[in-house]
Image (cartoon, helix red, strand yellow):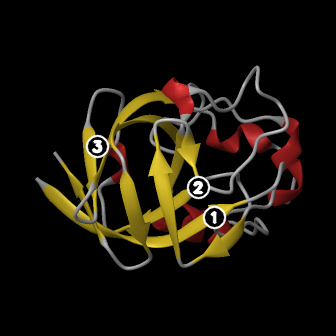
Amino acid sequence: MAEGRIFQISVSSGGVPKLAVSEVEVTAAGVAGDRQRDLKHHGGPQRAVCLYALDRIQALQKEGHPVTPGALGENLTLEGLDWEAVVPGVVLHLGPEVALEVMSFTEPCGTIRGCFSDGDYQRILQDRHPGWSRVYARVLAEGRVAVGQAAVLK
C-alpha cells in the first residue's frame, strides 16, 4: 500500500486548463462542476475522473514545458505516489469516502499542445513514454474529496 495526497482538484466548464477548487463531489458520472467538450474521447463512467502526478508535472517543467496542475485536463493532481504503479486495475482511495479504479491510460490530444515547449503533446503518451501518461478512472464509491486528503493506492 502506498499513500500520497490530493495536491489539486481541477474543473472546467469545458476544455483546458481546468481551474483549481478546494473540494468537490465525485459521482459515477464524474467530478461535479466539470464538463468535457468532446464526449467521444472524454467523460463517461469508464473515464469519469482524470488523474495525474504532481512529480510528473514538475519534471516536465524542469524540461522547459510551461505546464501547470490542471492544464493537462486532469481533475485530480496527486503527489507522493509512485506514478508508475498507477496502472489499469489498481484502486485509489481518496479521503474517507471516495474509491476509484484506474481503467486506462489517456490519449493526449492537440488541445494540450500549448503545455509543451515544442508542441509535442505526445510527450505524455504511454506508448512512447511509459509511466508519463495521465489515467482515467471509474468511481467505485462516491463522495466528497478535498485538497490535502490522503490518496491511498491499494
Q: Quadrant of residue 2?
A: bottom left
Alpha-carbon span between mark 3 and mark 1: 22 Å
Alpha-carbon span between mark 2 and mark 1: 5 Å
Which percent across, then down, holds residue 6? 40, 69
Earlier residue among tags 3 and 2: 2
Earlier residue among tags 3 and 1: 1
Which amino acid does the dot numbered 1 rest on? Ser
Earlier residue among tags 2 and 1: 1
What number is the disc on residue 23? none
Q: Nearer the viewer, residue 51 or 28?
A: 28
What number is the disc on residue 85? 3
> With respect to residue 38, does 151 lie above or below?
below
Which amino acid does the dot numbered 3 rest on? Ala
Residue at horizontal 89 percent and vertical 56 percent from the top:
114
Q: Which residue is mark 2?
A: 75
Q: Are marks 2 and 1 in contact (CB under 8 Å)?
A: yes
Q: Which residue is mark 1?
A: 10
Within-10-Å neighbours for mark 2: few <14, some 14–19, many 20+: many
> With respect to residue 139, does 143 lie above or below?
below
Within-10-Å neighbours for mark 3: few <14, some 14–19, many 20+: few
**Secondary structure of residue under mark 2:** loop
Which percent across, then down, holds residue 28? 46, 36
Which amino acid does the dot numbered 2 rest on? Asn
Name the quarter where the C terminus is drawn. top left
Q: Is residue 3 left or right of residue 126?
A: left
Residue at horizontal 70 percent and vertical 53 percent from the top:
72
